[in-house]
Image (tube, grey):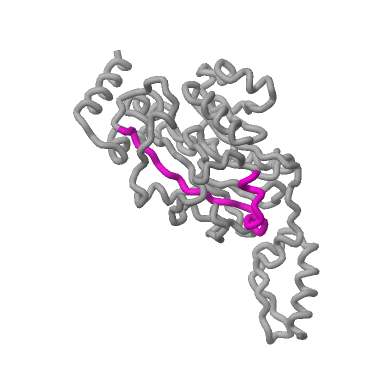
Amino acid sequence: MVMIYLKKILNTYLSFLKPIAVRIYKVRIYNTYYIPIKRSYNRRWTQYTRTGKIALCCIAKMENDYIRFFVEYYKNLHFDKIFIYDNNDIAGEKFEDVINDYIQSGFVEIVDFRGRELVQLSAYQNCYDKHNKEYDWIAFFDIDEFLTFSDENDDIHRFLNKKKFLPYQLMHINWRVYGDNDLLDNDGRNVVERFVEPLPDEDPENSHIKTLIRGGLSYIKWENPHTPFSDSYHCCNPLGEPVNTNSPFQNYDFSVAFIRHYSTKTIGEWVRNKMKRGLGNHSVAASKEILNLEFFFRYNRRTDEKQLYAERILKDELE
């Protein structure tokens, strides 16, 4: 009874502390007993944002062919706001040319990150630091990632308001990666209609996750594009099961929700778009080393037709 009483007093005291207590693992009482307190006090002083609104943050470059469908898809899931960090080249395409109606209505906000390299993590950090008091949750997805509910739920609010998620401050949702489905190029249909066959469930890429974060958290630090470093908070998967907060991987499960990830699209789009655009968390030079034809064929069936098609595009661009 004495130890229980002491633990209650200790937790009450810790509820008023700032993050200096975040990394405390154990406290010694009377030089004899140890009371584990890591994270035990966290929810006592963490005040979630309660606005009833949910936002999505993304960084985008050379996505004008896809951005309108992306915006409409998430509007249909009842997201309240999308923050698009515009990372196009200074003289490159502009999102205003294709989604100006959504910008004018206030559903989409464009943030100028044009002409900058290696800014995906700083964009995520800026978005969370600036807007976490305005939204109950903020999702951090890419333009080729589409949240999907297995039960055909079409409302992000209904999903995130489930009681089983109350103890958690972050949620990790698995990728479900789709290849090119043996198509050569963009035929005008959206990605969901074009690519219907995913990679095998056991493909290692499906162990990757992306993250949704509650608003109102004080200690979120983005160090990789999949999940922030946030050792003081609890994380779950869509089943409501606890998972490693800081890991960009978890065992795949598609039974409740997953993220359709159209990572390569077709060989034509890969050469004209992805190889030029690069990766948001890599320099242009580093991206060129990674995003080559061999990378594409790691995830898609190699055929002479695809190889020749890619070579023809590359040749035309050099002339």
* Quarter of the image where one finds residue 178: top left
Q: Which residue is pictured at 52% across the width and 16% down the height?
A: 91
- Residue 203 included in the magenta stretch of the image: no
Rendered location of residue 167, percent (x, y): 66, 59
Q: Considering depth in this image, is 174 or 240 the residue closer to the camera?
A: 240
Q: Position of residue 260 (x, y in %)?
A: 45, 40
Q: Residue 100 location, x and y as percent?
A: 61, 18
* Drawn side of residue 32 relative to residue 272, left or right: right
Residue at x 56% of width, y 21% of height: 95
- Nearest the viewer among 196 and 47 is 196
Q: Which residues are magenta?
A: 158-181
Q: Residue furthest top?
A: 319
Specify whether residue 173 is painted magenta: yes
Q: Quadrant of residue 303?
A: top left
Q: Quadrant of the C terminus?
A: top left
Image quarter (top left, top right, bottom left or bottom right) of the N terminus = bottom right
Q: Is 140 placed left or right of 106 in the picture?
A: left
